[in-house]
Amino acid sequence: MVSHRRAVKKKLLWAMSAAAVCAPLASLALRQRDEHRASATMRDALARFDAPLEGAVAPESLDWAGAQRLLDDVARSGAAPDDVRRARAVGYACRALGDLARGDLVLAATEVQSARRESPDDVRVRFVEGAVLQRRGERRHAAQVFEGVARDPATSAPLRVRAGVHQLDLLLDEGDGHAALSLAEALSREAPRSAALENRLGLARASVGDGAGARVAFEEASQAAPTDPSPLVNLARLARQSGDLARSRTLLEQALVRAPENGDTRLALAVVLLDLGSLDEARAAAREAARYLPEQAGPYVALGEIALRGDALADAVAAFRQALDHAPDDASARTDLGVALARSGDREGAMRAFAQVTERAPSVGQAWNGLGAMRLALSDPEGAIGPLQHASRLLPDDPNPTMNLGLAFERLRRWDDAARAFRETLRRAPTSEAATTHLAAMQPPAAHPRTAHPRTTAMR
């Protein structure tokens, strides 16, 4: 009996010991299963950043919402601490992409800062950081970030190409055509048959003067993406530059068939129609562009140009002011406003507009010419000389600044300087009747008791 009790007790002790041993093993197995599931979920989330360019060129076009849901699951799961931290970091980056989609750059920058605190070296976090910097206009910093992402060995091939596309856009924006062309060719080899890259390759070739090569690239992009209007718009731009306005119009109309609600295409069509002299059609196209691009200045600048062409000066002034409401730093729109004000007789207002441009964008030669012309018209020839000389240097082929300069020197009886300015005007515009007349009337001071009545030439 005692022996039986001892045997039962031993069995119980053995079972309890076995359970104690198995409990940690079971817990470990559960933990490993959870970590495996979390890793698989993490891979699925990160793969959303490796989507092909086609159909998702803009970073906010990535499936950031789906990735964020998956990453939130990882952060709440029993994943390893490093995976949880990474999930939180990339999750913040996904929220930043959502902010970009809504146009909230401030909140996007805040989310990026949170992401960098969690995982500053994650390539996806840095890619989103570059996208936010680019959208905020911090181009140099953005270019550095994208270059770092492209060079990082941890970057997947699709993400490396995507970062390269953003680098390429920044180079094109900066006007560095040769660097853009080199990068575009390299990316095209890495991702052949990409319409987005072929389109950018065309832009890069056009920026270095290779119109024929650009045309080939745009045509290939158009064939690769038969619903994308961008290649046709770029082909239309080439046709306009070559003087084939009819061809340009046809291409833009074809682009509108592909994307009827594309405001940029309608704006380009308005410009071509203005070149063709079809003011009513141009005005209608520009108004449609404004409907599809309500927050952009371009359609209102086009409406102002159309109004100027038709001598509707009050409409021109109103349109340029609307453009500046949307883009206060648009030097072209402010210069055009100065032209419209000058032509409507508001010389003081025109002079203020031109002066603002010279202060904010000192490389705009038309604004310096306008400022000098208004000073001359307001009986300040001495004050006109400096701006007109500067405009003459910035616009080496434009006869207007040198003509105005000659008039200013003539008003001051500086005959030799006036003669040189009129001769330079004739070099730039050999058929200029005004310069020929003033130069022929030049006499030595003793035989020239008064100057010709000064007048200013066109603002542009």
Image (spheres, rainbow, N blue to C red):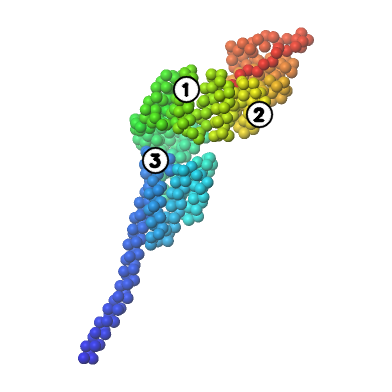
Q: Amino acid at mark 2?
A: Arg
Q: Position of residue 442 (x, y in %)?
A: 71, 10
Q: Position of residue 270 (x, y in %)?
A: 47, 24
Q: Earlier in the sequence, mark 2 or mark 1?
A: 1
**Residue sitting at x 41%, y 58%:** 75
User: Which class describes the residues within 10 Å of circle 3: few (<14), some (14-19), or many (20+)?
Assistant: some
Q: Nearer the viewer, residue 153 or 56?
A: 56
**Residue sitting at x 65%, y 15%:** 422
**Residue sitting at x 39%, y 57%:** 74
Residue assigned mark 2 = 352
Q: Earlier in the sequence, mark 3 or mark 2?
A: 3
Q: Are marks 3 and 2 in contact (CB under 8 Å)?
A: no
Residue assigned mark 1 = 282
Residue assigned mark 3 = 56
Residue 441: quarter of image? top right
Q: Nearer the viewer, residue 74 or 281?
A: 281
Q: Position of residue 157 (x, y in %)?
A: 38, 45
**Residue sitting at x 48%, y 42%:** 103
Q: Nearer the viewer, residue 257 or 416?
A: 257
Alpha carbon distance from label 3 to label 2:
44 Å
Alpha carbon distance from label 1 to label 3:
32 Å
Residue 208 appears in view: no
Q: Earlier in the sequence, mark 1 or mark 3?
A: 3
In the image as oriented, which residue stretches furthest toward the bottom? 2
Q: Are marks 1 and 3 in contact (CB under 8 Å)?
A: no
User: Which class describes the residues within 10 Å of circle 2: few (<14), some (14-19), or many (20+)?
Assistant: some
Element under disc 2: helix
Compared with 436, 391 (above or below) is below
Q: Amino acid at mark 1?
A: Ala
Image quadrant occupied by the N terminus = bottom left
- The residue mark sitting in front, 3 or 2, is 2
- The residue mark sitting in front, 1 or 3, is 1
